[in-house]
Amino acid sequence: MRINGHTRMAAVVAKPIKHSISPLIHNMAFEKTGVNGVYLAWEVEVKDLQASIENIRRYDMFGVNLSMPYKQEVIPYLDELDVSARLIGAVNTVVNKNGILVGYNTDGKGFFKSLPSFAIRGKKMTILGAGGAATAIIAQAALDNAEEIFVFTRQSSYEKTVRKMAAISRQTKSSIQVLTLEDADSLQDTINQSDLLVNGTSLGMDGISMPLPEQLELPDQILVADVIYQPFETPFLKWARNQNVTAVNGLGMLLYQGAEAFELWTGKTMPSQEIWQCLEAVSYTHLTLPTTPYV
């Protein structure tokens, strides 16, 4: 796409952010859909966040994506919040609707779209962690009518997590239990009941750490997912694959949460399969993107 006087901007705002592959994904999407847009990475200091958000309206941008540490800090500068953003208490996408800045959270939708031939409705999920990414997944599972959600958190975070999950449960009328990661017996019991096991923590980014005890066993039909995509195979995923179950990393979540944002901005469907193939070609991953992402 040739940049001209009609080109509109979108950006990802965070610090640090220069490492992000979001510009690659979204600029390919603009090119392949014929949308006259360009996507940049804005590494912004906290003191400049408000001015950066005001620039969305000032320069008639499509909007922005937010990453850490600004998913919560951005909320006071927005005009409206979507139901998912209100429920989660964090925003990863801002859409410029004719000068009205609306905050969304597409992380949960992106996560579930990334899972191969899986729908959470009527199923049970065990998730490790209750931070930003995990909360987005929990909230989306609740909105999508999961039968039961088991949330495991550290003992030190237990009371805070109970309060947060109670609010989500109350607003969605869903069943959410909070347990401690230190309780290995309860973790094994909930895994045995679950259709989906998710690592929603950062443990494994170092290529060494495990978010749960390695002696735990997985039932045959469980699907395992990690929100981490670098490294592409975490110790958690390797542990799951060694037990011969399907396991997926977080790159699909990154792609599909971006696809949700792209559609909110442009009204067009991101050609996700084509973009995944391009990512493979430049060696971002050797994993297979599900062809039927979300039912």
Image (tube, rainbow, N blue to C red):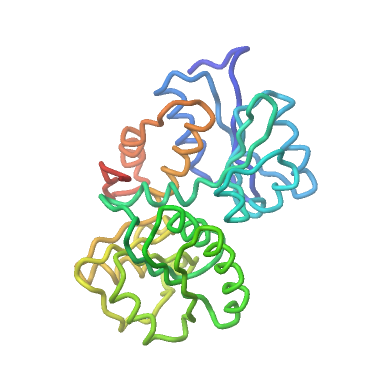
Instruction: Say whether residue 59 is left or right of residue 225.
Output: right
Q: Residue at x 53, y 61 (%)?
A: 135
Give the camera-side residue of 192 and 226: 192
**Residue 219: % across, % down:** 23, 73
**Residue 269: % across, % down:** 40, 29
Quadrant location, the C terminus: top left
Q: Which residue is drawn at 30% across and 84% down?
A: 215
Give the camera-side residue of 290 and 287: 290
Give the camera-side residue of 175 and 9: 175
10, above or below 291, in the image: above
Q: Residue at x 57, y 47 (%)?
A: 83
**Residue 229: % across, % down:** 42, 55
Q: Residue at x 51, y 37 (%)?
A: 261
242, above or below 66, in the image: below
**Residue 104: % across, % down:** 57, 43
Residue found farthest to the top: 5
Report which quarter residue 18 is drawn in: top right
The total number of labels drawn is: 0
